Image: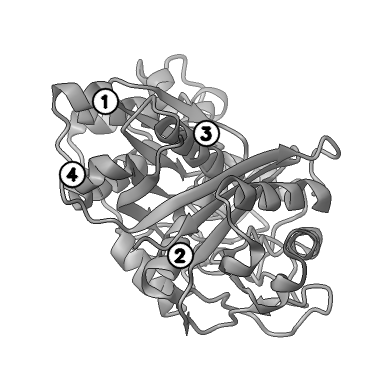
Amino acid sequence: MNRRVVITGQGAISALGPTAKSTLSAMMDGVCAITSLEFPNADRLSVGIGGQIKEYDPSAQFSRSELALFDPFTQFAVLSAREAVAQSGLEFGEALSLRSGVILGSAGGGLQTQDENYRLVYEDGKNRVHPFVVPRLMMNAGSSQLSMIFGLRGACYTIATACASSNHAMGQAFHAIRGGSADVMLTGGSDSMLCFGGLKAWEGLRVMSSDGCRPFCATRNGMVQGEGAAVFVFEELEHARARGAPILAEVAGFSMTADAGDIVVPNQDGAARAIRGALADGNLSPEQVGYVNAHGTATAVNDRTETAALRNALGTAADRIALSSTKSMHGHIMGGTGAVELLSCIAAVKDGQLAPTVNYRTPDPECDLDIVANTARETPVEVAISNAFAFGGLNAVLALKRFG
């Protein structure tokens, strides 16, 4: 028999706020944290906006020795994990540490470290780089640092599947606990790709907006990148109950599929199969779903395809299910985006609060769903699903259920 998995802690940092609480509060207030970019050579970019974390002082959070090893994406993961573990009330003793692990998602890893050192070598002509460049930029840096900080000696790895990385990571953490190989997992994702090299590469794809992120709106003209992280404590239900832990939501189902088609163009069949699979995995029906946090990148093709996939997967139930894309507020955090977006799904099933899609101006007949437009909504939600559909045709969908 499968074991039940619950969420007992959450932590985050994003352009909306330095904690999960402040990020959620800003979401529900409909704050758009997409602003002008501030970093070296930003003036050489044609896209000058993003969900950049500002008024952030790393030296106030970490020692000099830590900063020598921590790229911003690792810093964000550590800060989020600290918050999540503190909320959960967990103490990792000898026995529990062997039954606990870390699975994070990231699309870029230490991209800022890589970009900075490329510039030092190729532009400034330096012949040496810092000896910790590799430990800073490697994809598993965030996961490994969390395992060491908290003494977690179970499975520890990072998943890199572009924009689906966090959802894949959280799905694997869910499977580890449900299947009995772990009792507790720290999971989520982190990315910090707002640097000249990172954005210059994305500009080449011609999918970026220079004037704002407007998912599902007829005036949408592209995505806007953000940065940040979210980390959650996933825990086996009876283990959480035995210690009187706060339970935020239950992880009910997960599914992942591949389009096996185009490397960048999404396919509605693959997405629909992932949505149906997550519901089937949790023994849930479309009629139980009350909220969808959409992938909603605000590109013309993605939003239209996702709408069709939801109608395909949910049938007539799609007409009454509320949907939003919080990317309109914090930007597309790439491999970390699914984790930050899961905050809104937890708020939906726990508190009946539905985050809005801001900047929504004009309905698009091809995106004819119940968009939570511009203002948050309050309504009881039994089940929420979080969609992540990545380049490479990789789809990962999580289903959360109200606990209690």
First reached walking from the N terminus: tag 1 or tag 3: 3
At label 4, counting other C-alpha atoms closer than 10 Å, the crowd grade (few under 14, some 14-19, many 20 or more) is few
Which of the image's four quarters has the C terminus? bottom left
Query: Residue placed at 17% from the left, 35% from the top?
Result: 63
Marks 3/2: CA distance? 32 Å
**For this view, does 343 lie left or right of residue 151?**
right
Q: Are marks 4 and 2 in contact (CB under 8 Å)?
A: no
Whole-number angstrom distance, CA of label 2 to CA of label 1: 27 Å
* Residue position marked by numbered label 1 in the rendering: 152
Identity of the residue drawn at 48% across and 56% down: 400
31 or 176, which lies in front? 176
CB under 8 Å between discs 3 and 2: no
Element carrying mark 4: helix
Can you identify the residue that label 3 sits on?
A: 115
**Count of labels shown?**
4
Does residue 294 lie above or below 82 as drawn?
Answer: below
* Residue at the spot of label 4: 242
Q: Mark 2 points at which residue?
A: 344
Whole-Å distance between the Cαs marked 1 and 4? Answer: 20 Å
